Image (cartoon, rainbow, N blue to C red):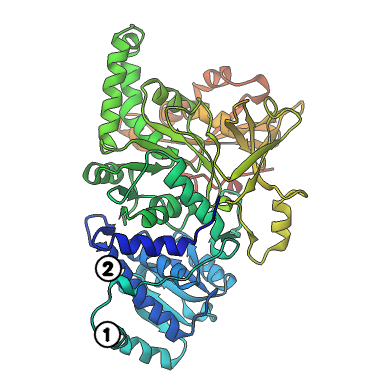
Amino acid sequence: MVFQSVNKLLEKSFKENWERPALSNYRGVTLYYKDVAKRIKHLHICFEQCGLQKGDKVAICSRNQANWGVCFLAALTYGAVPVPILHEFKPGNIHYLVNHSEAKVLFVDEVIWENLSEVEMPGLYVIVQMNTLKYLYSRYEGLKAVRDTLPDTFEIAFPEGFSKDDISYYEDSPEELALINYTSGTSGFSKGVMIPYRALYTNIVFAGVTAEPQMNNRSEMVAMLPSAHMYGMMFEFLFEMTIGAHVHYLTRVPSPKVILQAFAEVKPDVIIAVPLIIEKVYKTNVKGFLDRNQFFMMIPGVNQVLLNMIRARLVAAFGGRFEEVIMGGAALNPEVEKFLKRCHFPFTVGYGMTECAPIITYEKWNKTKLGSCGKAIPGCEIRIDSPDPFQVAGEIQVKGQNVFLGYYKNEEATRAAFTEDGWFRTGDMGVVDADGNLFLRGRSKCMILGPSGQNIYPEELEAVINNVNYVVDSLVIDDGGVLTALVYPDYHQAELDGMSRDQLMERIEAHLPDINKELPNYASIKRIEFMPEDFERTPKRSIKRYLYQRN
């Protein structure tokens, strides 16, 4: 793979798509590529006058919005290192990450800023309000004068107006640090993943060449995942900017109702999602219908008519124009996957990690195998650390152009993340088939050792439990040698259906024998405990497992 400068790809895209829409706030402002380019230049002048050097860190902490994209691109194309920080983090964590990353500039949402303090972040030169791009704080008095004279400076620099011929972005190199992305995983403390430009380029090439359908500068994208997370950042934003596509930021909590409403209006060409969204649509719109029509689903001919009808309704619900739903971030519930395959719904499940910026495996929806998350992308290799990788699950290890440089200021974690021969240790367990298709089994950190040494992957047990009516989500833990299912039920739906909480719990517990029939004897669930409220989750909506472990 011949490397090209990512920033020069952006420069070319901005010049070619000058008059096309680039970033929109859903039901709000739309910035064209020329508008984004002007704001980027405006910020470049700010950076210069603040004394920001190439390689300095620029922290960005905000909900999804058009100016998030502007600020990220401004830092990247200047030669600075963007540090996206999830706005869901608590104030103390944000202070820590800004300081740990040694950021000189902080772009922050006004709502988040209310709970932050410049005193807790002494290394910052300036703090800029994301919504307005105005200074909230500057360390030096002289910077306040810079802020006030900036419009005049811009006009003096471009007396005839800023044009596409004035664009000239920093030219990056393959091994150079592009950004630091702090993990939001299920296992605790955030680590700063150092992503090089070659990893960004590998993912951009994958999305533009390998993945299907092919998108172009007339494509529409709804961005509903956190842009501060590598999955959403790469495939709902950065790749789109390199080809001139139009990104619509939801700018609000991505509830299923809001998401489906946006799909209906925007009609995206491709949908990037986490499995939880699809699973919720299945449970609320499909499962009840299937349960009521079990008899008809067994009649040849009639069942196909019903499947075609359900598929048409699902396609319409997701906007009707898309060619594929690409899911990642977690495993898809097997029951949901089997049904979607059965009705030929165009979806695929990929596999990736922040450390790979993020994609590792993918396969087009009509080629992927049931239960698989595809094959290694070009420029990437995978291997299974197992004596029999086709039958016995082992750790998935990765090598390639998409792999990160290491963890920022954490040499011990970096050493632990790689094998002696240079392969990245994902911590995930899986097997492969003869064709190279990867099948995930679970996280090695989550694996429970059975009574006779069997490997129990709680994710596989949880998929069975989650199929029970009124179960929203579950988490299986080893509680002193007793496999226990922590269950968060749908209290609201049960109330609507006339059930008390006690009746709801009795109903779910009555399913325990049926659940265990589907599990190996050594993996039988012995006890169910009910959660009074939903589990604490990462922005990808994965459960923060480490908070619930008892051993």
Please give the count of numbered marks on the rendered protein: 2
305 vs 168, nearest the viewer = 168
Q: The residue tagged with tag 1: helix, strand or loop? A: helix
Tell me where residue 96 sits by quadrant. Answer: bottom right
Question: As displayed, is residue 116 above or below residue 314?
Answer: below
Identify the image quadrant of the C terminus.
Answer: top right
The residue at 29%/44% (across/down) is: 268
Q: The residue tagged with tag 2: helix, strand or loop? A: helix
Question: As displayed, is residue 527 above or below residue 52?
Answer: above
Tell me where residue 429 sits by quadrant. Answer: top right
The residue at 31%/10% (across/down) is: 296
Residue 155 tag number: 1
Question: As displayed, is residue 484 above or below residue 100?
Answer: above
Q: What residue type is labelled 2?
A: Asp
- Which residue of the protein is positioned furthest toward the top in this rendering? 299
Q: x%, y% of residue 85?
A: 48, 63
Res. 468 in view: no
Instruction: Look at mark 2 in the image and give the residue it sits on.
Output: 35
Q: Earlier in the sequence, mark 2 or mark 1?
A: 2
Mark 2 residue crowding within 10 angstroms, few (<14) / some (14–19) / many (20+): some
183 vs 464, nearest the viewer = 183
The residue at 27%/85% (across/down) is: 155
Describe residue 105's horizontal placement relative to residue 154 as left or right: right
- Proximity of marks 2 and 1: CB atoms separated by less than 8 Å: no
